[in-house]
Each structure stands twice: as structure tokens, then as C-alpha cells.
């Protein structure tokens, strides 16, 4: 059995490990969900939103890799398999089929909003046990809130 | 209701649409599954396999985008959401937790093998109805078989 | 008199040569027509369509060069002069003067639709006489259908 | 006291120096004003205008550096401090707070329009005293008029 | 009806607009004509001329875009459609079919010569009404005369 | 009226919003002030300081964009207009006209010193209400203190 | 003994494997032969042909790697050793020593002609057993025929 | 005597200065030690570890520069001379001469483990006196722990 | 005898040809003279001036190529041979041997000053006969005056 | 008959020419042999060796081009045809078919060892007759010995 | 026990091995010492010297890697550990703490002077036993002497 | 008076200094002479030779900088002023005015031939006094002889 010599106590590791696993699932789901809308959006704003969503996908992919590798670095096996994501994501889902541009923007406002609330919880939860992981969550939150703003500004 | 003027007949479109949707699910699953092993592999070959898996992820992501956009181009709404992938993928799954290097290689040989068999079926199925989609499947198969070879050669 | 030793029989060469010449004219016209709209489009979607059209221009220019050089490679002199394009293009024309954004999108949907129908005919016609030329037409069709989708999705 | 050996007569230098100082102030103000709207624009065209404004900022920054260094090269100390810009700019201002997309476009049409009128005056004023500075103003005018067109075309 | 607030008077605009439209047609035709020779040239100097012609094409494409957008910036709708180019170009034409290298060089000397004469006329015509457009024509003339020299030097 | 769903309480938002607005004004002023000295510095160290100041400008521009967009992301409209900067900056000013190299360095030591004191106040003020904004201020402080050191070291 | 689980039946594999091995040998020989002429060509067209031949070398090297790895991917060990190439190539040879430019061009016309005939045979032979390998041969044929044309056009 | 106007109190500066000096020594030693193993490793995993160690060297070099310049920015003279590093490093040493691959990995696991423990102490020590320096230590710790994981995973 | 069909009359050509030949000689001499000082400068400002001079060299080389090719384009054979440059340059010379930094700066101020005076004469002389050549001289003058300023500012 | 005016005497030229021809044959064979193993290697170290061999191929290709062009530069016609390489190489051969990773490494150790011995002989032989060619052989030897070391270190 | 089959005799290897080990120690020490001054230099020439020293560091790092790998290639284990460098370097040391710019330049003149004397001894010592290593020492000496010149020229 | 502490004895320095000064003059002259022909060549091979000459110019410029800086590094002031080059170059001259392509090639064969003979003399002369300078001359000779071959091969 593989055991990493973790720099954290068991109690701290449990808190941090759960935060990282939760973030991983949310971020993978965000990348899949943004791609889904990227392919299915229709309406006069198609091209703009189509491109904007690929930036969300890129951000979500980079951050999901960071949190998964952070979990591994602490000795916690990350789980980013499809079924795990489908079962545990906290982002809600997007409807099947074509989606009108305004609805597409709304879907992202909603998904990013949910992701932010949960990520801010992780920032708080990990402050004491592991400032290194906290710093990663802070950086992710900044990016999510930036994209959240841009989609909100678009549906005015 | 959004309707693309498809260049294919309804019958042909049904065959091609199913092939594209099936390929999309397999390729997204391949990208998730390869990332999962990328994070969880352990053993003396860790670094080599860790890097190799990111090449599989990159290939799977590029091709999944191509097949999804091809479906949209034919007027078929693609579905790449987490639950759809979890439910419909034909690649089998990888075990939870850390995975020894030889097992990691074996898991990829198996997943790629399953993906190839299904992709070759799509090459055959789409030859008559849509040589454009077939050409995409042929290109994907070439890449999958190349990676399949490299993992097989590694487990000798 | 310059004579290339063509790898095709005279009968096959006639079919393939006509397909290549037809494609050349359509693709040059597409590049001119897309530039025309790129300069003349007005309306709130101006910038998005202006940029999108330059992608169409780039695709059309690359493919027109490929089909013209393919004709030369088979010993058939390609003709891409302005008068030939003006006389033989199958894409219809775009109106003179400023064009509103929705009309601009509609003009591209129409021009790309015409180009696709003709290009698919060439895919079929060249399958037997020259699979090498057919493969080029297949690749062009994929690109045209992708852009066709994006303009259609924008006018919903 | 620092004195550059200027290639111009005192009378010519006065005209050219004032033209350069005036252009500097306008261009810095344009860069600040375009950034202001870049951050505050809301509405369905948010993303397109947000990106477009950063191109204006980039152009304004490059040109403001050129005219300031041109002034220095002629021995005239350029003044681009905040208070000078706030006091001397001829571009008008943009309102405080969030700004709707159509209003944002309108604000730029107006600011660019004012900048162009003044810049054309400098082209005329400097023709005799310094064709080198005139050439710089001509190039700036070309860029301003190009952006002016694009914002005008967007508010149709 | 779309109306740009032009910085020029109506009389000046007429002169400048005609100059820009004329330049647009010549430059598009030059790009088509140079590509035509690029594909059809034969003879021992094939490769050198084939490559040289693509540089002419690149120059002609960049400048045609600049003059068309300059027309739009002044509120004059540019017309670069195939039929317009075929009907209004002042460059003469190139013969159908394969063309020997020395003839290819001669054809370019002739086409560039015609383009230069007309472009120099535009430099003169626009000096008073619009030095900004004049500056663009001056830059184009410099490039055309450079290429003209190189083809002339080659046919000695 | 545009309202972003801010992740912060009203009380926290007030503190953080003021910190971001204050930082925005200081950073824009720093960019203008550093450019002013960049153009007006004279003396044997001219070139070195001229180049060094452009690095300060680049840093100030990047950070001003980040804090303005952070304000927008929290639903606070940022104000970076010339008059606002002229009125609210806490950096002091630089004298009109040419500036000797040693004075130029001294002016930057002073401006950066003022900016740092204020930025450290923002790091402290935002720790509780918004660790995400605090992290941005920490990064900015690091950069400002690095440049502060380099100018101090130069005036020994 | 190493055994790849080939996606092809034994009969199909035999046909495809022979085609790939034959292509490998031809392409390596083409790369060596083109380099040989690259070094030994003399005459007034030296530089042009010298550069052109390096493009042939680059194309031949890339394609030889592709077909060899394709063979490995199907479980067929590729053989690209010097003696194998010397014994089995179907391209003929080039004479020892310096070679005049016109003869150099003629040698390439002849070698490429032989390579094309054989490659077209492989396109035909692999259509049924393995469309994936066929697609690779089609792409190679397109490149060879393009270079064949350019050398033919040069010897007119 | 050169005195930087430090933003920290003397008491805080002492704590932070010692932390930065300690980090500097550890990071330089890590870069030397990783290079030492990079050159001396032998065994079947030679190439993989040889490359992996250069990534550690790059990370250690970048971070050592950052902490040294941070010390300077606070007015504390950094000391990274060979004798200081040899005397004060907390990483232990690596044996003289060739080193088997598994031992090489073990040596890095041990050195990185020591570096991490000490770096985490600095994160804690600097939280109150200087969050800016703390943020730097947090970033370094994240990188060290990532590399620590990868070497641990390799020796399973 | 080689004769280019010049777009200028004989009288105009004489004026423009002399201006271009004069500029060529000055610019080549400037490049040689700046390199000379680049190698021979000594003193505490060595590195700064050494680098600055290479920027002058780069500018002088680019412009000398432009004016020489402009002469060729007009059918005037340019002469940039060493003896011609040594005999006809209007820049004065720099002393043999090592040169102190302040003297180096002074030498460049003097050489650039001479070059500018002559170049401004060419701007004036060519305005009527050839605005295309004039535009080139204007651009060169702008660059020379920029460098002139920077060296002057350095010797305060 | 083509005769280069060689800078060497006939006697020296004979020695140097033979050394260059011998090096050419060895280096081409090394590139072919390394590619052969690149395609045929199997075993757990597959990926690492597969990549490492492409670095050997790249080095061998670059150096073979250098020595062949060096021969041409001295007036000696180089011979790098397949049959010449097969007949004259001094590197031994590699077995047909799949090759286990340890054997692959051994094969390279052996081939590189042979190449080095011969190359060192050429360094010695050419010192007097042509230090320019000797310098090339010295550089090649350094590269070969570096790769030799890495393969040796891998088979411990 | 690991034994490389060295191309040198034992006697030659001893000489060359000592030269390489000595060079390694000097070059690592040079890189540390130059970084030390890079961080601690103060005075009006701070920025110029700060940047110049990073070029020395870069050169020293590249060359130290080359000589260490050269030692390994010959079968001699290189030793670049901190204690070895501290004990065996022949470069002298630099003082603790801040260092005035003129002293910084002087310290580098001295360290480079010492390094050059020793490196020239190695060029001489290795000429007979190993011209390959000698060639490396020659290249290093050229770089060291270039930097030595530049620092000397700066302290005039 | 500036005195570099040269690593060479006075006698050796005299020999090496003269060799470097001689090489400097030849290489600058080669760069001027090649540019002269680059601008004046006419004939059907114009474009090929025009491009080839710019490669000679680039090589000559890089090497002239290297030998001049090498002289400075040894404490010998280099002299690359126009009059020195005109007076001391050993390359002969090229005729005034337009030059036919075959004559252009002949002029380069002659100039490069003269340069090579002199450079080989420097290789011999500096072997004992300074192997570092010799190594530079060897590298230059290799480049000159390569270009010499290519021009010779072209005039067959």
C-alpha cells in the first residue's frame, strides 16, 4: 500500500483532502458543462459566447489539474472519473439540446455562482489546516468570480 | 425550434449522428480516465507514464471537440455532459485510488482497445452516408491505434 | 507544349480536372465575397461578424491554393483569373453597398450552402477516378460545413 | 538648463510643440477613457466591446509614447501627468458608473470624433514647419478613423 | 440608411473615394493574377518565380484590405466583388494556361507597371483632399515599385 | 439598474470596494507618472532609467487592470478617469519639465514609497472581508517593493 | 515473443504490412537520394534545387516515420535499415559524383515518378483491408505528386 | 552605509530576514544537489530522472532568486555564497560519486522533505510580520511538495 | 545595357537619385561608425552605451538597405562600396582607439546631427519630384532624431 | 568536368576527403539504425528510449549534412546513397524485428562506441592537413560521446 | 561498480578528469558569486551591473553543465556539491553585505581574471590527451575573456 | 590611458592583434561588397543571388563583430572605420554599376577566395600564441569555404 509522508496531521488532511476532492469534481464538471454549451448555443450572440466558453473550459482544466495534483502531493488519491463527477458535482446541470444565447449565459451565471459559493467555503475551511491549499483555492476563486462577472454583465 | 439545413438525408443523418455521439462520449471518457491515471499512477515508471497520459488527454480533447462540432454542423445536438458520459461510455472504468505503473499501462491498453473497436465500427458505418464524418473517424482511429501500440509495447 | 505525365487516365483526368477547376472558382469567389461582407457589414454585431468573415477568407484562400496546385500536379492548368471567377462561380453574389448584420449572416449561409452542395458533388464524382483529390474535397467540405453551421446558429 | 539643439526654428518649434503636447494629452485621455468603458460596460454586447476597447487602449498607448518622444526629440518637454490630462484633454468625458453597451459605443464614437477633428488640425498645422511630425499625425489619424468607423458601424 | 460622419467634404470625398475604389480593384486583381501565374508558370526558373509571386500576392492582399477599410472609414462602401474586379481592373490580363518563365516575368512587369502608373495618379489626386489616404497610396507605390524592379531586373 | 450578485456582505463590500478603487487610482497615477519621467529624464544615466521606468509602467498597467476588473467582479463600478486620478491619487506629483537622473530616481523612490504604504494598508484592511482581493494586493505590494528597492539602491 | 493485438485479420494484416514496409523503404531511399543530389548538384540553378531538395527530404522523413509507426501500431515490425533500403527500394538510383542541375531535376522526376506509381498501388491495395492505412498513403501520394509536378515544371 | 527604508518594524524584519536567508540557502543547495544527482545518476531509469532533476533545478533557481531579491527589497543583504550554502543548508548532503537510480530518487525525497519542513516553518513564522513574504513561501512550498510527491510516487 | 523604365522624368530622377545615393553613404557610414564606438568605448557607462550603439547600427542597416533598394527600383545603381563611403560620407569621423564614454556620446551626437541636417535637406529636395522617396527620408529622419535626442539627453 | 579550387593540397585533400566520406557513411547509418530501434523497441522502458533515440537521429542527421557539405566545399563529391551506406558503414548492424529495451540500449552503446573510435581517428588524421575539418570532427565526437555515456549509464 | 568504457587511456583520463573537475568548481562558484553581487550591488550603476551579472550567471551555468556532463561522458564522476565548491574554487570570494558598484565591477574583474588563468592552463593541459575537452575549454575561455573585457572597460 | 590586463605576452599579442584586425577589415568589406552586389545584380538568376548574398552579409556581420570584440577582449583596439576598410581590405573590389548574374557570382567566388586564403593564414599564425582566437578563425573559415563552394557550384 502506497503511503505519502504527508506534511499535515490526519485531522487536517481529512479537511483539506475533502476540499480538494470537492473542488476537483466541480472544476471537471464546469469544463464539461461549458463545453456542452459551447457546442449547443444558438442565437445572434453565438460566436461571442462560443469563444468565451472555451476560455472557461481552459481555466477549469488548468485548475482541475492543479487541485488533483495537490491532492496527490498530500497523499490523497484524487477521483475525477466520469461517474464520480456525475454523482458529486455541486454545479447543477445544463439542459439537453440546443440552447438559446441568453439561456446559455444564464446557465453559466448559475453554474459559476454555485462553484464560487462552494469554493469560498473551501478557502475558509483550509485557512488553518493548510495555507498552501488555501492559496490555490483563493486563486481559483478569483478566476471564477471574474468569469461570473463577465457573464452577469452580458445578461443585463 | 432550431433546425440546421443538413446536407444528409434523415436516414443517413441518424446513422452518422449516432456514430458522432458515441465517439464523443468515448473520447471525453478517455480524457477523464487518462487524467485519472495521470494523477494516481505510482511506481518506478511514474514520470514516463504520467507524461505519456497527458498526450492521450490532449489527443482525446482535440478529437472530442472535433466530433461534437461535426455533430452540430450536421444539425445534431451533441451531448457531452458528465452524466451522459458516465452512462454511455464504452471504455470500461479504471479502479479507484492509487494504481501501480504496470496496471496503469494495462488499463490504458484495455481502454484504448475498446475505443478502437468501436471507432472502427463507426468508420465502416459512415462510409456510405457521410465520407466527411468517416474521414474524421479514420484520423481518430490512427491516433488511438498509435497510442495503443505504445502502451502495449511498454507492457512486454 | 508542356505535358505533365499524369498518373490518371485521360477519362479520369477529365472528371477530376473539372472538379478541381470548379472548386477553385468557388473558393476564390468565397474569399472575395467574404471580404466584401467583412468590409461592408454594419449593425450591432459588426465586430463579431467582421472577425468571423476573416476566418472564412483564410480558409477559402488556403483551400483555393491547394486545389489549384492539385490541378497543376495532375497536369491540368488551373484558371483563377477574375473574369473566370466572375463568370463561373456557383455561389451567387452579394448585394452592393452596406449590408446589415443579419443580412450578412444570411448571405454567408446561402453562399456556403451553395458551395457545400457543389463540393459534395465533387467528393462523389472523384471517388473512383482519384481518391487523392477526393480526400482534398472531403477536407474542404468539413471546413465549409463547420462555418455553415456557425452562421446558421447565429441567425436563429 | 537642458537645451536640445532642435532642427527647427523657434517659430516652427512653437507650432509643432503645441501640436505634439495637444496630441499627447488627447491620446492619454483616450487610453484612460477607453479603459474606463472596458471595465464598466454592461449589456449583451459586453464581451465584444470589452475586447474592442482594449485594442483602442493599445493604439492610444503606442501613439502617446510616440508623440511624447517626438516632443523630447525636438527639445520640447512633454507633459502627460494626470492633472494635465484632466485639465487639457479635448475629448469630453464619459459618465461615472456602469454604462450600457449602446451608450458605450456612442461614447467612443463621440470621443474618437473629437480626437480626429483635433488631429486633422495638427496634420494641417505641421505640414510646413515639420513634415516629420506631420507624418506621425497622419499615421495616428488613420488609426483613429479606422476605429471611429468600426464603432459607428456598430451603432447602426 | 447607414451614414458615416465623414471628416471630408463631399467634393473631397468623391475624389478620395474613387481613388480608393480604383486601388482596391487593381490590388485584388493583382493578387488573383499573381496567383494565376504562381500556379501556371513553367520553365527552369519555375521555383524562384513561383515563390516570388506569393510575395506579390501577400503584399497585394494586405494593401487591398487597407484601402477597402480606409474607404469604409470615410463612409464609402468598397466593392471588391469578382465581377467588379473583372470589369474595372486596369491591369490587363494574363493568358490562359501554362506560361513560360520569361513570359511570366514579363506579365508581372507589365501588370505592375500599369498598377504603378495608376497608383501614382492617386498619390497626386489625394494630396489636397486627404493626406491620410495619400500616405497609404505612397506606401503602396513604394512596394509596387520594389517588386516592379525585381521582375525587371530578372528579365535582363 | 445593473446589480451583480456579490459574494460579499454589504459591509465587507464597502471596505473592499474602497480599497480596490484606491489602488486603481494609485496604480494609474503610477503608470502616468513613470511615463512622464521616462520622457523627461536627462543625465548620464538617461538610458538605464528610461528603460527601467517602462518596466514600472508595464507593472502598473497590468495591476491597474486587475484591480479594476476585481472591483467589477464584486459589483463595484471602478473609476479610472483622468479627473478622478488627478484628484484622488495618493502618490504626490512629479515636477514639470526636464528632470535630472538623480532627481528622477528620487521621484520614483518617493512615489513608490507612498504607493507601498497605502497598499499595505489595503492588505490589512481586506484580510477578513475578502482574502481573494487581499491576495491581489499582496502580489502588487511584492512588485512595488521590488521596484522600490531597485530605485533606492540606485541613489546610494 | 512480442505480440500486438492487431485490429486486422491475418490476411488483411499481410497485405497492409507489405504495403507499409514497401512505402517505408521507398521513402527512406527518397530521403537519402534527395540529400545525395542536394550535396552534388552543380550548375546555375544550384541554389534553387539545393533548397528544393531539402523540402523533399523533410517530407520523405516525416512520412517514413509515419508509415513505420503505423506498421508498429498494427503489430508488424518495420525494417528501415540501410541494407534493406539498398536492397528493396523501387526508386532506382542516382549516379555517383557531381550532377548537373538539369540532370538533378530529371533524377528527381524519375525517382518521384516511380515512388508515385508504387504508392498509388498501395492506396488501391489497402482500401478494403485498412482504410486507416489507406488514408496515410493518400496523404503521402498527394505530397509526392505535388513535388513531382514542381520538378517536371522546372525541366520544360 | 546603505539603508533601505524598510516597510517592516525592526522586530518583524529580523524574523522575516532570517526566514528569507534560510530559504535562500536551502534553495541554492537544492539546485546544486539536484544538478549533482543529474550528472551522477546511473541505472535503467537514468534518462527519466536526469530530466526530472533539471526541472527541480529550474524551480530552485527561480525561487532562490525571488527570495534573495525579496530580502534586498526589505533592506536585508542576502548571502548566497558557496561557503555560506555549504555551512548553513538544512538539506543534508548527497554522497560522492555515481548514484543508482533508486538511491537518487531516495536522495531527492529526503532533501525535498527537509526543505518542506523548514519552508512550512517559514510560512508560519512570517504570517504576522509580513504576509507578502509569507505568500512567496507558500508558493515555494506548493512547488516543493509537488516535486516531493513525484519522487515519492516513483520509489513505490 | 540594363535600363529600368523609371516612373520619374530624367530631371526628377537626377535629384532623387542623388538624394538616395547620399543617404546610402551616410547611413552605411553611420553603421560603421557606431560599431566602431560600440567596440572601443570605455568608462563606467560602457555597457549602456555599448548596447545603445547596437540599436543605432540596426536602424542604420535597415534604412541603408531601404534607400539602396529604392534607388534600384528607380533605375539608379546604388554605390555602397567601402571606398565610396570613405570618400563621400558627410558624417565626419571618429578618432582611432579607445574612447571614453562621454566622448563616445559626444561623437554620436555630432554624427547624428550631421546626418539629420543632410537628411532634412533630402526631405525638402524630393517633395516635388518623388513623394515616395520623400516618405522614406521622413521616416529615416524621425529615427535619427529620436536617437539624437537620447544621446543629447545623456550628456547633460 | 566540375573542379572546385580547393584550399588544400592534393595529398591533404585525399586524407581529409576520406575522413569526411567515412564520417558521412557512419552518421547516415547511425541515423537509420537509431530510427530502426526507435520503431522496434519494446519493454517497460519503451517510451524513454523511443524519445531518446529521436535525439540521436536528430544529431546524426545534422552532423551528416555538415560533413557532406564540408566535402563539397573542399571539392570532394560526397556519397550518401543507400547502397554506399550499407556497404561501407563501420557501425555494425542491429537485428531484424522487435528488440527488448535492454538490448536496444546495448545496441546503441555498441554502435556509438564504434562510431566514436572511428571519429577519434579522423580527429587525429586531419589535425595537420585541415584544422577546419578537424574542428568539425571534434564537435561531432563530443556529441557522440555524450550520447554514448547516457546509454551506458542506462544499462547499469 | 559502474565503469564507463572511456575513449582515453588512464593517464590521459587523469589529466582531463582533473581539468574538468576544476573547471566545474570554478564555474559553479562563478555563478554563485555573480548572483551574490547581482543581489547586493548598490550605487548609481546598479541596474546596468545587476543585468550584466545575470548574463555572467547564465554563461557560467551553461558551461558548468557542459563540463560536468563531459566528465560523466569520460567516466569521471563530477562533484559540484556546495562543500566541494566552497573548498576547491580558485576564484577567491566576494565580501559579505552590500557592495558599491565600482567594487562590484572590481570583484568581477578579479574573479574572472582568476578563472581565465586557470582555464587557459586547462586548454594547454588537455591539448594532447583530449582535443575534445580542450575544444570545450577554448570555448569557455572565449566567453570568460569577453566578460572580463567588459567589466575592465567599465572601471576605467 | 586604458590598459586591459591581457592574458597573452606582448609578442603573442602583436601576432594575434594583427590577425584580428586583418580579419575585421576583410569581413566588413565582405559585408559591404556583398550588399553592393545584392543591390546591383541583374539577370535571370537575380532573385536567387539577391537572397544568397544576404546570407553572406549576415555571416560577415556576425563574424566581424566577433573578431572586433575578441580584439577588445585582448586589449587591442579594433579599427573598422570606412577609411580603414577601404584602405586595408584584401578582397579586391567589385565594379561600379549594374552587374550581370554570372559576373556577380564570379565576383563573390573571387572575393571569398581571397578572404579564405588570408583567413587560413591567420589560423596558422595564431595556433601557438592563442588557440582561443584560432578557434574563432577556424569557424569563420568553415563558413567562408561553404559559401565559396556554393558560388563555385553555381557558375559551372
Image (tube, coloured by chain):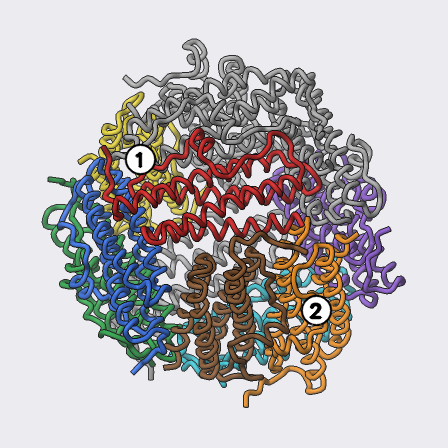
Chain colours: B red, C blue, D yellow, E green, G brown, J orange, K purple, L cyan
Q: Position of residue J2 (x, y in %)?
A: 55, 87
Q: Position of residue C119 (x, y in %)?
A: 26, 57
Quick one: which residue is furthest to the right in this view? Answer: K11
Q: Is residue D122 visible?
A: no
Quarter of the C terminus of chain D within the rendering: top left
- Choose top left, top right, bottom left or bottom right for residue C19: bottom left
Q: Is residue L7 left or right of residue B21?
A: right
* Chain under disc 2: J
In this rendered view, identify the residue nearer to me: C79 or K40.
C79
Residue at x-position 24% and y-position 50%:
C112
Mark 1 falls on what kind of element?
A: helix
Q: Is residue C16 left or right of residue G103?
A: left
* Chain under disc 1: D
- Choose top left, top right, bottom left or bottom right for residue L60: bottom right
Q: Are marks 2 and 1 in contact (CB under 8 Å)?
A: no
Q: Position of residue G78 (x, y in %)?
A: 59, 63
Q: CA distance from mark 2 to mark 1?
A: 62 Å
- Give the label on residue J93, or none: 2
Q: Is residue J144 left or right of residue L155?
A: right
Q: Is residue C16 left or right of residue B23?
A: left
Mark 2 falls on what kind of element?
A: loop
- Choose top left, top right, bottom left or bottom right for residue J76: bottom right
Pointer 2: residues within 10 angstroms few (<14), some, or many (20+)? Answer: some
In this rendered view, identify the residue nearer to me: J46 or C96.
J46
Residue at x-position 78% and y-position 50%:
K24
- Give the label on residue D48, or none: 1
In this rendered view, identify the residue nearer to me: L98 or L154.
L154
Tell me the mark number nearer the camera, choosing from 2 and 1: 2
Amino acid at each position: 500500500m502506497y503511503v505519502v509522508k504527508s506534511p499535515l496531521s490526519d485531522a487536517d488532511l481529512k479537511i483539506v483532502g475533502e476540499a480538494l476532492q470537492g473542488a476537483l469534481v466541480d472544476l471537471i464538471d464546469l469544463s464539461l458543462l461549458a463545453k456542452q454549451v459551447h457546442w449547443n448555443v444558438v442565437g445572434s450572440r453565438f460566436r461571442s459566447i462560443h469563444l468565451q466558453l472555451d476560455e472557461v473550459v481552459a481555466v477549469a482544466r488548468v485548475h482541475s489539474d492543479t487541485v488533483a495534483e495537490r491532492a496527490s502531493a498530500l497523499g490523497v488519491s484524487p477521483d475525477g472519473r466520469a461517474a464520480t463527477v456525475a454523482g458529486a458535482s455541486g454545479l447543477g446541470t445544463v439542459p439537453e439540446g440546443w440552447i438559446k444565447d441568453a439561456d446559455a449565459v444564464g446557465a453559466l451565471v448559475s453554474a459559476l455562482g454555485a462553484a464560487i459559493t462552494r469554493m469560498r467555503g473551501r478557502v475558509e475551511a483550509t485557512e488553518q489546516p493548510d495555507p498552501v491549499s488555501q492559496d490555490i483555492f483563493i486563486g481559483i476563486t478569483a478566476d471564477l468570480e471574474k468569469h461570473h462577472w463577465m457573464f452577469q454583465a452580458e445578461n443585463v
